[in-house]
Image (cartoon, helix red, strand yellow):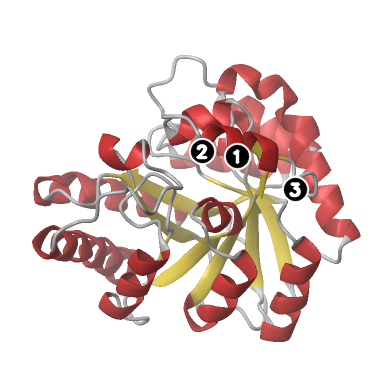
């Protein structure tokens, strides 16, 4: 394997840019470097400034690069198309002008990527992890979401040469096994790849190893996280939003939870996966004082099992 481990601002609680408790982006950059990572994600739209010179200098001075930008927004509403494409333009215009990530010989598409996630629906947020009670989109709304994803992916590819990778996310309308299967049928590999997340896969009731293997031919990018099983079992018995569960510690440093990373390493070796894997650990930003220690624990553990 030729794999590079990176990390993301969500490890510092950066998910909702409207949250008044977010740490400064410069502090996150400092701690990414201090924890031993060479690369990171940009984080949600609006967190890191869309200033090529300022962000390039911040990355270069720390020896960092950006492996992916993120669309984390309502992908369902047809009225949201203009906003989604505006974000695509602005994110891709920035990430393609920043210090470039390295590319492994066997990597399918060069980074940086544009990771695309659906978000913003209360009825699904409160049903995160509960496939049996989560409402599904009707055919019209599903096709509208597919059209929005195609529009994002086509713009990123044709205007900027950026590969879109679709990320099934707990609490969004692409989360569960049936939805990922439908996504794979409706969005062809030439349009967009997949960014599968071991933690969101497990949270949604799937086996991360089996899911990575099933979609190996669509796998352009991977997220790693771990889950504290006792906290998970408790929050699954409550009516709770996904990020409220994260604030209560359902995500933990990799190696401290229930996901089998030696088995994942063996599978990725067998698949000859090459490229990037990003460590994530969603949390309350008010607890970001523990982020540096946790992302270092995750990186050290992954090194100990062969990553």
Tell me residue 27's x, y (percent).
Answer: 65, 25
Residue 86, position as x, y percentages in the image: 23, 47
- State the mark number for residue 304: none
Question: Residue at the location (60% across, 58% down)?
Answer: 198
Using the numbered discs, state the Cα–Cα distance from disc 3 to disc 1 in whole angstroms. Answer: 18 Å
Marks 2 and 1: CB-CB under 8 Å? yes
Label 1 SS = helix
- For the point 49% across and 41% down, the residue is 43
- Mark closer to the observer (2, 3): 2
Secondary structure category for the residue under label 3: loop
Circle 1 residue: 233
Disc sitting over residue 236 in the figure = 2
Question: Which of the two marks, 3 or 1, is nearer to us in this view?
Answer: 1
Of labels 2 and 3, earlier in sequence is 2
Q: Which of 32 and 245 is in front in this view?
A: 245
Judging depth in this view, the residue of 304 and 91 nearest the camera is 304
Decide: few, some or many residues near mark 3? Use Cα within 10 Å; few <14, some 14-19, many ≥20.
Answer: many
Work out which quarter of the rendered image holds the C terminus and state it. bottom right
| Residue drawn at point x = 40 percent, y = 37 percent | 50
Is residue 1 in view? no
Q: Is residue 202 left or right of residue 297?
A: left
Read off the residue under disc 3. Answer: 254
Pick whichever, 192 or 248, lies toward us.
248
Categorize mark 1 by other alpha carbons within 10 Å: few (<14), some (14-19), many (20+).
few
Residue 6 can be seen, yes or no: yes
Residue 20 image position (x, y, % from top left): 45, 14
Q: In this view, does 121 lie above or below 172?
A: above
> What whole-number distance in Å separates the C-alpha atoms at marks 2 and 1?
5 Å
Q: In which quarter of the image is residue 289?
A: top right
Dividing the picture into quadrants, the one containing residue 165 is bottom left
């Amino acid at each position: 394997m030729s794999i590079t481990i990176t990390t993301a601002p969500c490890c510092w609680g950066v998910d909702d840019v409207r949250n008044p408790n977010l740490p400064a982006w410069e502090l996150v950059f400092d701690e990414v470097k201090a924890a031993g990572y060479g690369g990171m994600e940009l984080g949600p739209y609006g967190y890191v400034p869309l200033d090529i010179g300022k962000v390039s200098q911040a990355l270069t001075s720390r020896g960092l690069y950006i492996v992916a930008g993120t669309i984390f927004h309502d992908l369902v509403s047809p009225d949201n198309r203009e906003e989604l494409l505006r974000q695509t333009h602005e994110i891709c215009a920035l990430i393609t002008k920043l210090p470039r990530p390295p590319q492994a010989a066997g990597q399918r598409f060069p980074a940086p990527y544009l990771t695309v996630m659906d978000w913003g629906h209360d009825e699904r947020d409160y049903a995160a992890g509960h496939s049996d009670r989560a409402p599904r989109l009707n055919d019209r709304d599903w096709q509208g979401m597919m059209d929005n994803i195609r529009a994002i992916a086509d713009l990123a590819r044709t205007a900027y040469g950026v590969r879109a990778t679709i990320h099934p996310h707990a609490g969004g309308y692409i989360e569960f096994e049936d939805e990922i299967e439908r996504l794979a049928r409706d969005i062809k590999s030439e349009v967009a790849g997949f960014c599968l997340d071991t933690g969101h896969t497990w949270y949604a009731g799937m086996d991360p190893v089996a899911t990575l293997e099933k979609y190996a031919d669509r796998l352009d990018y991977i997220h790693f996280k771990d889950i504290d099983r006792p906290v998970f079992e408790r929050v699954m018995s409550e009516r709770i939003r996904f990020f409220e569960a994260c604030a209560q510690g359902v995500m933990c440093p990799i190696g401290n939870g229930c996901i089998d990373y030696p088995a994942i390493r063996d599978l990725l070796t067998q698949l000859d996966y090459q490229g990037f894997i990003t460590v994530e650990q969603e949390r309350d930003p008010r607890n970001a004082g523990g982020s540096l220690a946790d992302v270092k624990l995750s990186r050290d553990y992954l090194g100990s099992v062969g990553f």
